[in-house]
Image (cartoon, rainbow, N blue to C red):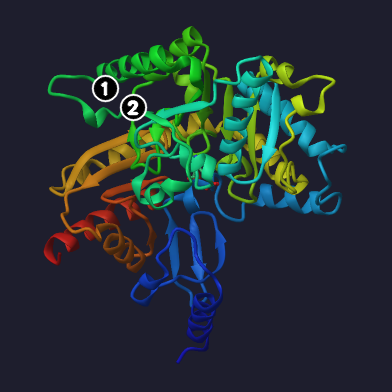
Amino acid sequence: MNPEDTRNADWLSRSLEAVWHPCTQMKHHEQLPLVPIARAEGMWLYDFDGHRYLDAISSWWVNLFGHANPRINAAVVDQLGRLEHVILAGFTHEPVVRLSEQLSELTGLSHCFYGSDGASATEIALKMSFHYWRNRGQPGKARFVSLRNGYHGETLGALSVTDVPLFRDTYAPLLRESFQVPSPDWRQAQPGESAEQVAVRAAHDLAAHLREHHSQTAALILEPLVQGAGGMAMYHPRYLKEARALCDVHGVHLIADEIAVGFGRTGTFLACEQAGIRPDFLCLSKGLTGGYLPLSVTLTTSDVYGAFYDDSTARGFLHSHSYTGNALACRAALAVLDIFRLDGILESNREKAAAFTRRCAPLIRHPMVRNFRNTGMIWAFDAVDERPDFSRRFYERALGKGLLLRPLGNTVYFMPPYVIEPEHMDLIVDGTMAILDDLQQNP
Ligand SMILES: Cc1ncc(COP(=O)(O)O)c(C=O)c1O
């Protein structure tokens, strides 16, 4: 046996003994391979025995500029020599100040409150919105409304506004009641209806809900343009415009959860830009550090900030996480923003996206492919396959072809790092077609 194989097998079995892996029924690993990764570079992940896997989903949508990006590496290493972390209550530091200034400039929102993972940004937005109304003398505004099929994270507050049954149903008794209104997902189109008309129809449902419930509603939370974990459902920006107007009319906050879609994923730096709107709260994470370190931020307006600014301690926002505003993570985020600025990423992504969509032409014609869709640097389709374990069978075959692809139910999606080149597009599209052919012949 090759000694390197032993190392691979060794890490695999030690991990299964000691690590409880996320979003996983661990028993499935009796059949499914667990992949120990030794190192990564650019689009590629390398295991211990020399196999490589093309990271076509940016390691759960976090990586923007490739693994081991030399510029982000250099920034983090430099920061390590200066300051790794300091408490952010009562203290501050250069990377968190610079990052907050730059994010405010980019988003038009005046204040940044930091968390660690995406779900903590969602929790912060929900709590801040409720507390804002309380501080303004409207404590009855304590409910939230979200979109059907929406996803905002796995902690209890975030899960309360999430509508993905697989993640939510088991914990339903622990969750606060929230309302879900119809999603503007264009797959709901009736014959002859455009994506924009679907958006307008869904906005009418939101209007009806807010007319009735606005006095108990603190905020509407949604994922702008693409509902990710719910199956890459895409919708027309008109919905965001209508939602913004309705929230204004009814005195309800709009929380834009751009944790997955921010940082250029939908073609603009923020998805909300495509509707020309600004939310009251904006949640960012994932791409914020280029996929390097856990960091999230909830941005908000000076109006919201002002409602907490008071002599009374209890009127302040007394929420915290130990690693809030971690200096290494903020420095990685600053390097990410530099790359956006210096390398014209949004322009080059437009060309890459057009090339990838052209490259997908034969895939779109595949008999197993339905509802092929694309927004910016996200592509998805629904596979025609009746078996309930489609996702696992596809994932396993993809690994066999050196591709990291993890369908959401029957939805196969590509969400690659922005350093993708034509040769990677070939591997993804040809590999996906070969897997579909194989699944058709050997169901
Ligand atoms: C839209 C959205 N919100 C929130 C989250 C939760 O982020 P995290 O997994 O970092 O807690 C995710 C994660 O996929 C997401 O896609």
- Residue drawn where x is 63% and y is 37% of the image: 339
- Secondary structure type for disc 2: loop
Asked if residue 28 lies left or right of residue 75, the reply is left
The residue tagged 2 is: 235
How far apart are labels 2 and 1 at the CA level?
7 Å
Q: How many marks?
A: 2
The residue tagged 1 is: 195
The amino acid type of the residue labelled 1 equals Ala
Question: Dot 2 surroundings within 10 Å: few (below 14), some, or many (20 or more)?
Answer: many
- Residue drawn where x is 15% and y is 55% of the image: 386
The amino acid type of the residue labelled 2 equals Tyr
In terms of depth relative to the viewer, which is nearer, 291 or 324? 324
Please tell me whether residue 370 is drawn above or below residue 245 in the rendered image.
below
Q: Earlier in the sequence, mark 2 or mark 1?
A: 1
- Secondary structure type for disc 1: helix
x and y percentages locating residue 377 in the rendered image: 42, 37
- Residue positioned most to the top: 249
x and y percentages locating residue 135 in the rendered image: 69, 19
Q: Is residue 268 visible?
A: no
In terms of depth relative to the viewer, which is nearer, 355 or 388? 388
Asked if residue 226 lies left or right of residue 309, the reply is left
Q: Is residue 259 visible?
A: yes
**Dots 2, 1 in contact, CB < 8 A:** yes
Q: Which part of the image, by quadrant, shows the C terminus?
A: bottom left
Q: Which mark is residue 286?
A: none
In terms of depth relative to the viewer, which is nearer, 24 or 294? 24
In terms of depth relative to the viewer, which is nearer, 98 or 307? 307
Q: Which part of the image, by quadrant, shows the N terminus?
A: bottom left
x and y percentages locating residue 183 in the rendered image: 32, 28
